[in-house]
Every structure is written in C-alpha cells, then in structure tokens.
Image: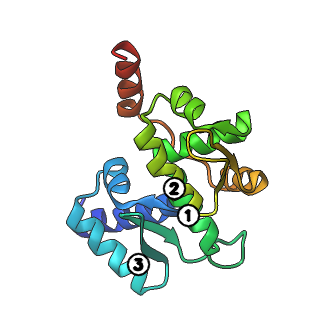
Amino acid sequence: MGSDDRRGSWAEALLSFVQRYPGVHFREIRRRLGIPIGTLDYHLYRMEKEGLVSVTATGGYKCVYPAVVPELGGPIPELDRRMLALLRQSVPRSILLHLYLEGPSSTVGLARDLGTTAQNLAYFLQRLEGAGAIVREGVPGSRTARLADPKRVHALLLQFPPLPEDPIDRFLRFWTELHP
C-alpha cells in the first residue's frame, strides 16, 4: 500500500470516527485510530477547510465535530457540542450517567459512588454546570446535583453513543479495583 493510499484510508477512518463520535478529543482520536499526530493534524486541517468537520477548543481539549449531521439537517447545536465534549471524558460521563440513572445526588455521595476526590468532582461539576448539563442546589457542604435536562442527555446518548471501552480502559479499571 502506497503512502497516498494510507493517507486516504486515514482520512476515511477519521471522518467516519468523528461522525460516529462527535466531540471526540484530538488525543483520543490519535489513540483510538493510531494516526500519527502530524498526519492527524494535517487531515483535520484539510477536512475543516473543506467544510467536513469543525475543530473547537473546549475545556482545554481540541474537540472535533462533523460539520453536518444528516439526521439533524445541519451542524450539532452549540449546547449539545459542549455536552458531547464532556461525555467524551470519563469523569464527566460517569457523573452524567450516575445522575441520569440514580437521580439527584448529594455531592458527597456522588464523590463516594464514583470513587473520585471531592476536588476532582467539584472541578467537573463546575464544568458541567457551566455547560448547562447539571444544576447544583443547596449551600456548600450540603449541595445536591441533578441533571438540568435528563431528556437531552438521553437523546444525546442515543444519537451519539459513548466511545466503546478499549482494552486499556478495562485494564485501568481492573487495576484500580484491585488497588483501591
């Protein structure tokens, strides 16, 4: 296979991946597809210029979205883009899924249930609140978090599923369960 053939297959794989998992982060694309960083940067630049994808910086991550989603008849709305970018990260996704499945939770209980620190949880809750995904109620020390719009989270998860867990993710989860 020549280098042009390989570049073409990388471009096709990249576009297909972004269409399936909008909001995916640059480094995650690189990790999942095995595309060298320079090549990935080149293809994203070219695809953005051609109007196939849009690349935005969200919360310190370079996130990639298809320019048009046929089912929507246009681009993904900005509020949904922010939510999708968060759903592509493990801690925010865990928070949103927990709140979706279990309903409103105290922040203390949420940190315990998710196995994360209060500081880490507070950081992501602030980002989720800023994205309009959650609402926190109460006073510091006894706050409760709930989804701002459970139907929106449900619809986004159905339309754009989370990235499948790969062997590295499974190993890391297994390892942390062995060594709490």
10 Å neighbourhood of mark 1: few (<14), some, or many (≥20)?
few
Numbered label attached to residue 126: 2
> Circle 3 sits on which residue?
47
Q: Nearer the viewer, residue 11 or 45?
A: 45
The tag earlier along the polypeptide, 3 or 2, is: 3
Q: Is disc 2 placed on a helix, strand or loop? A: helix
Q: Is disc 1 placed on a helix, strand or loop? A: helix
- Residue 20 is at least partly visible in this image: no
Look at the image and tell me in which quarter the C terminus lies.
top left
Residue 127 x, y percent position in the rendering: 50, 58
Look at the image and tell me in which quarter the N terminus lies.
bottom left
Residue at screen point 67% across, 47% down: 138
The tag earlier along the polypeptide, 1 or 3, is: 3
CA gap, disc 1 to disc 2? 6 Å
Tags 1 and 3 touching, CB below 8 Å: no
Tags 1 and 2 touching, CB below 8 Å: yes
Q: Nearer the viewer, residue 33 or 110?
A: 110
For marks 3 and 2, give the one nearer the viewer: 2
Q: Residue furthest top?
A: 178
Residue 124 x, y percent position in the rendering: 48, 50
Residue at screen point 49% across, 62% down: 18
For marks 1 and 3, give the one nearer the viewer: 1
Query: Hey, what amino acid is under mark 3?
Result: Met
Numbered label attached to residue 130: 1
Residue at screen point 48% across, 84% down: 51
Residue 39 x, y percent position in the rendering: 24, 67
- Residue 71 is at least partly visible in this image: yes
Vertical arrangement, residue 115 with respect to residue 100, above or below: above
User: Going by the image, does 13 lie left or right of 70?
Assistant: left
CA gap, disc 1 to disc 3? 29 Å
Tags 3 and 2 touching, CB below 8 Å: no
